[in-house]
Amino acid sequence: MKKSFPLFVLLLTLPTILLAQGKKAIDLDAVTEKHFLSGIGILNDLVSIPNNSNNKEELVPNIEWCEENFEKRGWKIERLETKGFPMLLAEKTFPKAQKTVLFYFHVDGQPVEKKRWDQEDPFKPVLKKMENGKWETIPMETLDSSYDAEWRIFARSSSDDKGPLAMFLTAWDALTQEGNSPNYNIKVILDFEEEIGSPNLPAAVLIHKEKLAADMMLIMDGPRHLSNEPTLSFGARGISEITLTVFGPRAAQHSGHYGNYAPNPAFRLSQLLASMKDDEGRVTIPGFYDGIKLTETEKAILTKVPDNEEAIKKKLGIGSTDKVASTYQESLQYPSLNIRGLAAGGVREMATTIVPAEAIAEIDIRLVPESDPERLFALVRKHIEGQGYHILDHTPTDEERLKYPKLVRWEGTISYKAFRTPFDSEPGIFLNKAMVRAFGKDPIKIRISGGSLPIAPFVDALQIPAVTVVTVNSDNNQHGPNENIRLGNYKEGIKTALAIFTQEL
């Protein structure tokens, strides 16, 4: 039987019907364009605050800015205490929402060397365009009347990771001003120690896990694929660090008097490090790659990433690659052993004719889900002992120097483990729908990214899947001088966040 409704009932319900339709019919491009300039203002305001995570005093204005900006938008905020600098939790709830999405950003940045930047101050954002192969400064006010997707804003943390946070806030402003809202609750966790490895985050997540409870986690950090096409990353490698110090004479000695007599720690350390890899870049330590066996299905997934191997080699300026795997994407599926720094004596104008007292190597191990860092540490230690070294956790005493021919000090830390989420998980399907609405095509899907993020503690403690929504340009110089964000990426990042907010969950 067909039911009829009085006219006044239809009139009362019409605004609700239109709002529901409006949520589905929002013009992502038009709304993004409308709010783009205000988004540039948010970005420039945020990146103007120095944010070296090694300097706690610099972090205070950053957390205060975040508190003010979330609070004035009607979000509930709370500082979550850690053993170091606190994290900030912002929360927005909706009466009929059934699900909760947790977003992660970090607000701290790497240290800067001002003299290496091509501008007065890395914390004074500068708009630049490419002219005759060089980046030339143009007035920021140019954006009031002109726009080019290839122009860039140069400032520390413009891409890593204040840019994505500014995209998020801009999209939120656009959403609310359009009279719209998500159909799920949102929590945002802001990390202020990511660039120093988030050492206090794992313990803090366990303490505050009830407040952080959610159905999924979305991370807005990191660059798109080299093609700059819309990209989702379904995992990230973890990271652990080792510092090895090999000892020679108690104090540096004249190489004329004691060369050929006092063993040189720089040579010994070089030989020790060289013993860990073969000529083709594969780790020779037995068991290092155990547990990783890529199936044909997994290899097929990796081949769908549109990498150009020759272009990658050209970009890096290398004629050959390590032979851990046959392609770039396959290489990311294995743990890596990397020497990130060496020190012994001096070079160039600091060179002296000495036998150094010690030689130091800084090593990082990038982890994949199959590799337990404690197991890898044990394998590396066993290998070092197999090379005839006695391992210490301190500077050797005189007695130890006389007793053991080869001495090495070991310092090891595990920052965080790896995580990986299936493509067909709930956030994977949810985000794919949002990206298709925004860009008219499926995004590139990365199985696991090369960089590390402190997300595994959330995944493990909260028992939720996590996916990274990467938005910035891959050539952004993050961590280095002249960090920048491409305007086209910034605009598309706002649209991406807006598509996520308006995608039903």
Image (cartoon, grey):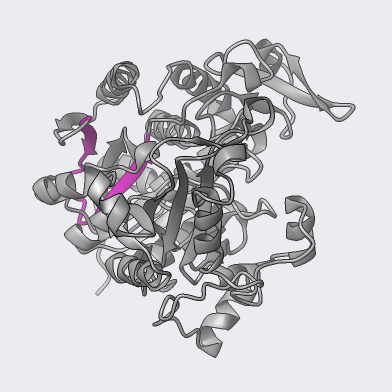
Above or below — where is 234 with respect to 223? below
Above or below — where is 363 with respect to 128? below
Q: Residue at x 44, y 21 (%)?
A: 46
Quarter where residue 27 is shown: top right
Residue 442 rendering spot, x and y as whole percentages: 58, 64
Which region is colored magenta?
Answer: 85-106
Queried whether the magenta region covers residue 376, the answer comes back as: no
- In the image, taking residue 284 as reference, residue 278 lies left or right, namely right
Residue 231 rendering spot, x and y as whole percentages: 56, 56
- In the image, taking residue 101 as reference, residue 471 lies left or right, namely right
Q: Nearer the viewer, residue 35 or 288?
A: 288
Residue 55 in view in this figure: yes
Q: Nearer the viewer, residue 385 or 337?
A: 385
Above or below — where is 413 with respect to 130? below
Q: Residue at x 64, y 76 (%)?
A: 303
Residue 397 in view in this figure: no
Which quadrant does the C terminus fall into?
bottom left
Residue 33 rendering spot, x and y as whole percentages: 60, 31
Residue 144 rendering spot, x and y as whole percentages: 66, 15
Farthest residue toward the right? 132
